[in-house]
Amino acid sequence: MQDSNKFVAISDEYIAYLSKEVPHVMSNKLTERTYHRKYIGIIKELGGFKYFVPLSSPKAKDYTKDGQIKRNSLTTIYIKDNKTLYVTLRFNCMIPVPESEIINFDLNDEGDFKYKLIVFNELYFIRQNRDKIEKTAKNLYNAKKNQANEDISKQTILNITLDFAKMEQMCIKFTR
């Protein structure tokens, strides 16, 4: 079993497989990679599946209209200090993954020292915030699985969340 305190990547084949049926699965950016860089993330156990929670670079949507970093939500945890947003954990983009498609991310293999330092600091944050991350993943997972019963205030968030039930069935059926 993967240690949820380590970064992992997901095989290109599995990402391509899910992307055929589920819109908005985060891509591994085959043609845009620097070194061997793919999306990296962490693994969380949810509903009997290993879920990959991807990290994402900061985007304009991560800031308020007055330029402040947004607050954590049911879909996103912001890895930041007082004034700089480094990366986000995107729970609405998490995917169930077969053990065979999980690739350990070895920080020592990273050729870009500056990027290596950033990733090291991100991992430190994740280890320090393990309980918050676990709670956020479980809350969103349960809300999405019970979407029909959720109140209207959560419906917009749940509509931008990937279809966990569909992907779980795809995960079970996946073969190389």
Image (spheres, grey):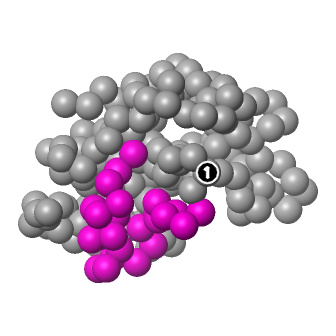
What residue is at 27 percent from the left and 71 percent from the top? 17
Specify whether residue 24 is painted magenta. yes
What residue is at 33 percent from the left and 70 percent from the top? 16
Q: Name the amino acid type tagged 1.
A: Thr
Q: Position of residue 8 (x, y in %)?
A: 39, 39
Q: Secondary structure at mark 1?
A: loop
Give the magenta-colored segment's residue range. 9-32
Image position of 102 with respect to 13: above or below: above
Q: Position of residue 146 (x, y in %)?
A: 26, 63
What residue is at 64 percent from the left and 43 percent from the top? 87
Image position of 126 with respect to 15: above or below: above
Q: Position of residue 18 (x, y in %)?
A: 29, 70
What residue is at 28 percent from the left and 62 percent from the top? 14
Q: Which residue is mark 1?
A: 34
Left or right of residue 59, residue 139 in this image: left
**Residue farthest right in this picture:** 66
Image position of 54 with respect to 114: above or below: below
Q: Position of residue 96 (x, y in %)?
A: 26, 54
Q: Nearer the viewer, residue 92 or 138?
A: 92
